[in-house]
Image (spheres, rainbow, N blue to C red):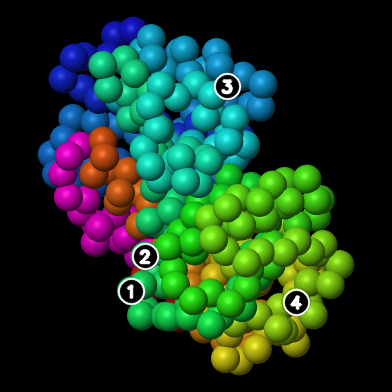
Amino acid sequence: MTNSIEDNFETYCIIGDPIDRSLSPVMFNTAFKHIGRKSTYIAFRVPKGELESSLHSLQVTKVSGFNVTIPHKVDILRYMEMLDPTARKANAVNTVHIAGGRLVGFNTDVQGFIEPINRRRISLNGMKILLIGSGGAARAIVAALSDQAGISNLVIANRTSNNARDLVTLASNLGLKADFATLENLGVLALKSDLIINSTPLVSNFRQSRLDHEHIRRDSVVYDIVYVPMVTNLLEQARIAKASVIYGYEMLLAQGAKAFEIWTGLDAPVGVMKKALLGPFGEPS
């Protein structure tokens, strides 16, 4: 990245580590090309411990905005000069708009997560929900769930307790009845759940999580926000169980569309962005 970026040429990026499998560059670059905008979007690897210096580099090179992924969604809060209500509610940031040199933090994961549920007209009223993982994305999921009426109970399952208990506190403060559980009894918890949400790559692989089709009810919904591969092992097990499934690319697309609108002030070309994500093979059958 250099200081030679033309004034009428905008650069956007995604920061995180690992970053090599991100589909955001193809999604956003296709969108920018479609509307004829002189913009580009790149992946910028930022290891843990290098966040502050990397943010300085982004500001110096006049990057217009960027997305934030693992492991920075929470740590980046301290560097924001303004926070949108979505970021304050989730206590995490996944989208940054640089306006007048100021870093303004948003959380488009909140809207991105709930959009596929609303589009399917799934009511969460009375549901028992299992959320696996407690990272930055999980915070946005909790924030989104807190806006839904009538949720019976939320169980947050995680390998370690510290982050998960913080998330339970966040959920409780937002009005949700929430409890913590370890991954040891994940199968039992899943069988009791109407909606199973996975927010960690570790559990997308059912061989590691011990969550297979025998632990998934046919009348349940399984939502894996992991999008590489498109059909994760967890979703494959859900399909074997004949449960309803929600794919991770759907959240990626919805949150990306919202970020596009924040950065450009224009409606996102959602159909074009979706086609870029799915490629020539289309939606999973």
Identify the residue under disc 4: 189
Query: Could you say where residue 230 lies in the image, as x and y percent from the top left?
Result: 52, 64
Relative to 42, residue 226 above or below? below
* In magenta segment, residue 21: no
Task: Kindly indicate whether the residue at mark 2 contacts the one at mark 4 (C-beta within 8 angstroms).
Answer: no
Identify the residue under disc 1: 119
Task: Kindly indicate whether the residue at mark 2 contacts the one at mark 1 (C-beta within 8 angstroms).
Answer: yes
- Quadrant of residue 87 within the rendered picture: top left
Relative to 123, residue 162 above or below? above
Q: Nearer the viewer's eye, disc 4 or disc 1?
A: 4
Q: Which residues are magenta?
A: 264-280
Mark 3 vs mark 4, CA separation in Å: 36 Å
Badge 1 marks a residue whose secondary structure is: helix
* In-front residue for pair 159/124: 124
Magenta region's main secondary structure? helix
Task: Mark 1: give few (<14), some (14-19) or many (20+) Cα within 10 Å.
Answer: few
Task: Mark 2: give few (<14), some (14-19) or many (20+) Cα within 10 Å.
Answer: some
Residue at the image position 38 percent from the left and 27 percent from the top = 82
Q: Which mark is residue 51?
A: 3
Q: Compare marks 2 and 3 and give the one earlier in the sequence.
A: 3
